[in-house]
Structures are given as C-alpha cells and as structure tokens.
Amino acid sequence: MTGYRKLPGLFLFASILTGTLLMSGCVEDPTLPVLTTDEAIEITTISATVGGNVTEDGGAEVTARGVCWGTAAMPALEDNFKASGTGSGEFSCIIDGLDPNTEYYARAYAENSVGVAYGNEVIFTTGIAPPSVTTGQVTGVTDNSAICSGTVTYNGGAPNTEKGICWSNSPDPDLDDSHVSVTTGSDTYSGTLTGLSSGTRYYARAYVKNEGGTAY
C-alpha cells in the first residue's frame, strides 16, 4: 500500500483561502436607499407639509433626507428642496414660499454613499388667497351722488368674481351697506355712489372678491 502524508502548510493555505472566499461572498455592495413620499397635508395658500419614510437604507448610512418640489413633474435636488434629518424612518417638512392657487409636484429624497434616491411623486394645489384693493379719490361730488375709484393690487392667484364700491354714513362700510358693482375688466375702476343726502358726510371703500374671500 502506498503511504499517505499530509502537507500541513498546503492544507492551512487552502483553508484560509476557502474561508476568505466564503467571507467575501457574504458581503454585499451597498445600494440606493428605498423610500416613499406621503400625500401633502396642511395645505395653505403659500405652504404645505410633505413627509416621507425611508424603509431601507441600502446597506449604507442615510446621510441626508428631505423633500424636493417644483411646478414641473419629477422634481429633484436641482429644484427646491428642504432637508429633514438623517437615517431611516419617517420624517416631514413644511415647504413654504409657494404661490397661491398653483399646482406643485413633490418627492421625498434620501442620500447614502451610493447616491440620491427619490420616493414616489405627489401632487397638490395651494389655496386661493384673498385679493387686495386700494380706494382712490372721490370726485364728481353733487348733492346726491359722487364717483369713487378703486385699484386691484393683487388678485390672490384667481380671477376676481366681483368688484366695486361700497359706502355709508358710518366708517368702514362693507357689502351690508350701499354698494355698486363694476363689470369692467380693468384693475383700476370707478363706481358712482347714488341716493346720497345733501350736506351729509359719507365714507366709501373699494372692494374686490374672489374664491378666497372679500377684500376692502
């Protein structure tokens, strides 16, 4: 029978090599994080709250996360964004400086050593703000009439539904008092106050309405 002799050094090298290969096979390269975007809540005329949830960090620390938004689809960090902490889990951001009555797109984002990942896109529309108007000079005063002008300085992000002049012999008249509506499409307009009493002090204010409210 032929003799058998072990080779300790070769056996040890093979064992180390095999162990190294096994260990190397167990280590996976990191990937991008995985996250979702929550629907927008607390929407106002100029702001909204949008959140997200980092459900997987991709095997590497999430070093930044937050929400990006814009008026075009698929917003990214090159657009507007606000950061909200690090790591996995839920988070939210108040995004502000928005325009009234405007459609916005938003996505949560998360960054690790591999790169930036984005969640699903959500869409929301900001509310309509009340308009603004100034009252001009009163002219053409007679015994029973006068002319007063107004200028719409801000439409609130929506078309005006009505505008005109209201008046009373008490301060700060409103639409519960005498008023006249004006149909002209111009931002600067005038209305005639009628049915006035001779020798009486009157107060007049321009007004304008849109879906967001009435301004004087």
Image (cartoon, helix red, strand yellow):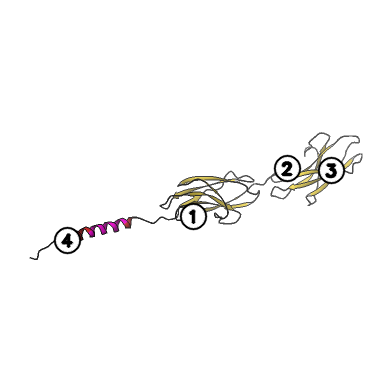
Q: Is residue 20 magenta?
A: yes
Q: Residues within 10 Å of mark 2 (few under 14, many from 20)?
A: many
Foreground: disc 4 or disc 1: 4
Tell me the tag on residue 137.
3
Of labels 4 and 1, earlier in sequence is: 4
Label 1 to label 2, Cα distance in Å?
A: 45 Å
Task: Please tell me which residue is depicted at 49% across the width and 49% down the height of the picture.
Answer: 64
For the residues bearing labels 4 and 1, Cβ distance under 8 angstroms: no
Q: Quadrant of the C terminus?
A: top right
Q: Please identify the dominant SS of the magenta region.
A: helix
State left or right for residue 138 relative to residue 3: right
State left or right for residue 40 relative to residue 9: right
Q: Quadrant of residue 139?
A: top right
Label 3 to label 1, Cα distance in Å?
A: 58 Å
Counting from the top left corner in percent of width and height, residue 11 is at 20, 59
**Residue type, mark 4 in image:** Leu
